[in-house]
Image (tube, rainbow, N blue to C red):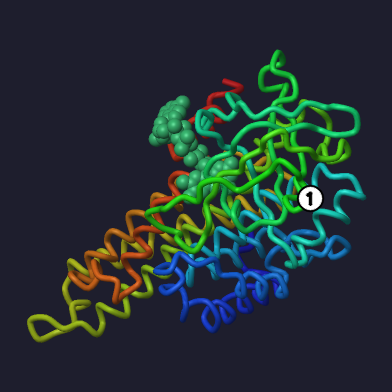
């Protein structure tokens, strides 16, 4: 067993860290306050290869491994969790299914622009009545001549209001249950009958747009089916397994930022004539934070390693997301406590970390669903 990062892994970690420190951290609070999409930052992340980390260079990506991807998401999310999820969605939820299930032509046409950072992707699964149980989706796609006609509304779609392309799940055969769900590639600009609906106002990750996608007799070319009809549900499960590594990494980034800022603050804030870091009550919080984060980060990197080595990782990615997100949520609440009244005010980024952390327990499968996935895995073959 070797815990040492490779030269390439150290290189992308360092590159992402420097970029995030220089270009993202100074504006992160302002982006949050203004609920502003970080278009320039996204373009720069694209130029650095961060929007297609694991995608081969022939399709516009950086051709690196999943550990590199997780390390980069951690670094970006330390500075800004919104930028972290924009990156995670492009890599895990858009690039991955395109690369894994797309034809050569689809990859050149729809994967290359996003993996190379010239466009943004999104992933449309959730609907108003189909969240944890996506098989209940109502959106339909019907083949008429050489076009699919799509009707329905997707809810809560990250990047939905700013993306150029989408991997969309829709029902093509209602009688077949979950085996009647298929995936499609949507080029928003060239899809008559599509428009962006409501853009959500949220508790956190405010610089990341979350929008409805509305399809009203929307027409896309027949060749924009991804894979075969009926494969959509299976594709979705595999896509989310990898996506959870990205969200777990986002949670670690939030947690790492929280720990660092808690250490800095506790060493400078004085009460009772000494820095508050001298009080055991504070030291124990910092020690617990550091320990929990270390454990969660190891689980995230191990899940990424399993994916790199083509070993099963469904259970491990669910465990990593469960532990990393719970750790981030708990650590940020403690972080606010360490900063006292200042933790509660927007002068410091701690309250943003706390608001941002919450979503990591919810999206790409809630932590209740993570426990179902883990239990299903450990109970099978018994
Ligand atoms: C900011 C944001 C961004 C998002 N981005 C995307 C995106 O890009 N693409 C996309 O497709 N979706 C996206 N989502 C949707 C997200 O994945 C869903 O919100 C999430 O899966 C939960 O679905 P739900 O909100 O309908 O909750 P519900 O499924 O209604 O769950 C409500 C509660 O019931 C619990 N519950 C449900 N079923 C069970 C069960 N069987 N056992 C135990 N407890 C259960 C849940 O854990 C939860 O606590 C996003 C959501 C948000 C808020």
Q: Residues within 10 Å of mark 1 (few under 14, many from 20)?
A: few
* Relative depth, front residue between 214 and 88: 214
Residue 305, horizontal then vertical, whole percent: 66, 54
| Side (left or right) of 304 relative to 220 | left
The vertical placement of 181 against 290, above or below, is above
The vertical placement of 140 against 249, above or below, is above
Residue 220, horizontal then vertical, whole percent: 80, 40
Which residue is pictured at 23% across the width and 69% down the height?
338
Residue 350, horizontal then vertical, whole percent: 33, 68
Residue 371, horizontal then vertical, whole percent: 46, 34
| Side (left or right) of 72 relative to 362 | right
Location of mark 1 (residue) = 190
Regarding residue 12, the answer to whether it shows in the image is yes
Quadrant (top left/top right/bottom left/bottom right) for the C terminus: top right
| Side (left or right) of 367 relative to 311 | left
The vertical placement of 308 against 146, above or below, is below
Q: Secondary structure at mark 1?
A: helix
| Side (left or right) of 346 relative to 294 | left
């Amino acid at each position: 067993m070797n815990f040492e990062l490779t030269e390439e892994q150290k290189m992308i970690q360092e590159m992402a860290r420097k970029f995030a420190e220089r270009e993202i951290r100074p504006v992160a609070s302002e982006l949050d306050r203004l609920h502003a999409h970080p278009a320039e930052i996204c373009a720069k992340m694209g130029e650095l290869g961060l929007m297609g980390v694991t995608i081969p260079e022939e399709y516009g990506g950086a051709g690196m491994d999943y550990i590199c991807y997780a390390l980069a998401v951690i670094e970006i999310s330390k500075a800004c969790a919104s930028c972290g999820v924009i990156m995670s969605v492009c890599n895990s939820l858009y690039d991955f299914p395109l690369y894994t299930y797309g034809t050569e032509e689809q990859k050149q046409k729809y994967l290359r622009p996003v993996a190379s950072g010239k466009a943004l992707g999104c992933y449309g699964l959730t609907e108003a009545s189909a969240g944890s149980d996506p098989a209940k989706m109502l959106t339909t796609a019907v083949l008429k001549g050489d076009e699919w006609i799509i009707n329905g509304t997707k809810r809560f779609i990250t990047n939905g209001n700013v993306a150029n392309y989408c991997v969309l799940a829709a029902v093509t055969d209602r009688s077949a249950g979950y085996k009647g769900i298929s995936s499609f590639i949507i080029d928003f600009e060239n899809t008559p009958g599509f428009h962006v609906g409501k853009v959500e106002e949220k508790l956190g990750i405010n610089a990341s747009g979350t929008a409805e996608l509305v399809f009203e007799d929307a027409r896309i070319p027949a060749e924009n089916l991804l894979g075969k009809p009926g494969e959509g549900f299976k594709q979705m499960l595999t896509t989310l397994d990898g996506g959870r590594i990205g969200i777990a990494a986002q949670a670690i980034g939030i947690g790492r930022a929280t720990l660092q800022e808690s250490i800095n603050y506790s060493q400078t804030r004085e009460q009772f004539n000494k820095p508050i870091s001298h009080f055991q009550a504070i030291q124990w919080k910092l020690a617990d934070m550091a320990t929990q984060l270390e454990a969660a980060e190891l689980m995230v990197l191990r899940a990424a390693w399993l994916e790199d080595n083509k070993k099963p990782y469904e259970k491990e990615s669910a465990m990593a997301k469960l532990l990393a997100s719970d750790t981030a949520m708990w650590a940020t609440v403690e972080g606010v406590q360490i900063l006292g009244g200042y933790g509660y005010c927007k002068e410091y980024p701690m309250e943003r970390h706390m608001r941002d952390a919450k979503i990591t327990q919810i999206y790409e499968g809630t932590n209740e669903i993570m426990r179902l996935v883990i239990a299903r895995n450990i109970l099978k073959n018994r």
